[in-house]
Image (cartoon, helix red, strand yellow):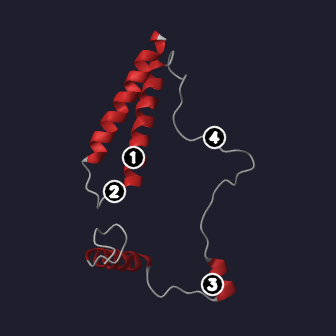
Amino acid sequence: MTELLFPITIFVLAILVGFEVISKVPATLHTPLMSGANSIHGIVLVGAMLIAAEADGPGRVRFGALPARPEEPAVIAGDVQRLATEVGFRPTVALEQGIRETVVWTRAAMRAGELPGSGQEGG
């Protein structure tokens, strides 16, 4: 039982610290759902650090991506060629311009209260 006391203490402290930090974030930046997700990620990070610290030597804990499985393709790349050949899609706006215009539109819609999370919805 005493072996579990330290990990449980760290777990509870991580929850309290995570809750305290997240509660200071304005509601317009994080919905309650995102706040909960961020708290959970903080707890996971603390747990990973504890596991790494308790490993019985180098190489016992490996971080990073898992190796690729033999059935996985070597490279996955997006290809919109089928859109062009099958339905005749041709972009009318360059990617950079489209992103820029989307950001400008989103900011204006949030200021006007037209998007969820803008703090002014429901009117």
User: Which comes sooner in the sequence, label 1 or label 4?
Assistant: 1
**Other-residue count near label 3 (Cα within 10 Å), few / some / many at <14 / 14–19 / ≥20:** few
Mark 3 sits on what residue?
A: 84
Mark 1 sits on what residue?
A: 38
SS at badge 4: loop
Quote the CA–CA distance across marks 3 and 2.
Answer: 39 Å
**Other-residue count near label 1 (Cα within 10 Å), few / some / many at <14 / 14–19 / ≥20:** some
In this picture, residue 21 sits left or right of residue 88: left
Residue at 28% over, 78% down: 108
Horizontal and vertical percent for residue 86?
A: 69, 85
The image's mark for residue 67 is: 4
Horizontal and vertical percent for residue 15?
A: 37, 35
Horizontal and vertical percent for residue 22?
A: 30, 46
Q: CB under 8 Å between callouts 1 and 4?
A: no
SS at badge 1: helix
Quote the CA–CA distance across marks 1 and 4.
Answer: 27 Å
Q: Amino acid at mark 3?
A: Ala
In the image, 53 versus 77, the foreground residue is: 53
Mark 2 sits on what residue?
A: 30
User: Which comes sooner in the sequence, label 3 or label 1?
Assistant: 1
Quote the CA–CA distance across marks 2 and 1.
Answer: 9 Å
Q: Amino acid at mark 2?
A: His
**Other-residue count near label 4 (Cα within 10 Å), few / some / many at <14 / 14–19 / ≥20:** few
In the image, 19 versus 45, the foreground residue is: 19
User: Which comes sooner in the sequence, label 2 or label 1?
Assistant: 2
Q: Give the label, 3 or 1, closer to the camera.
A: 1
- Which residue, as the protein is rendered here, is positioned at the far top? 2
Quadrant of the frame with the C terminus: bottom left
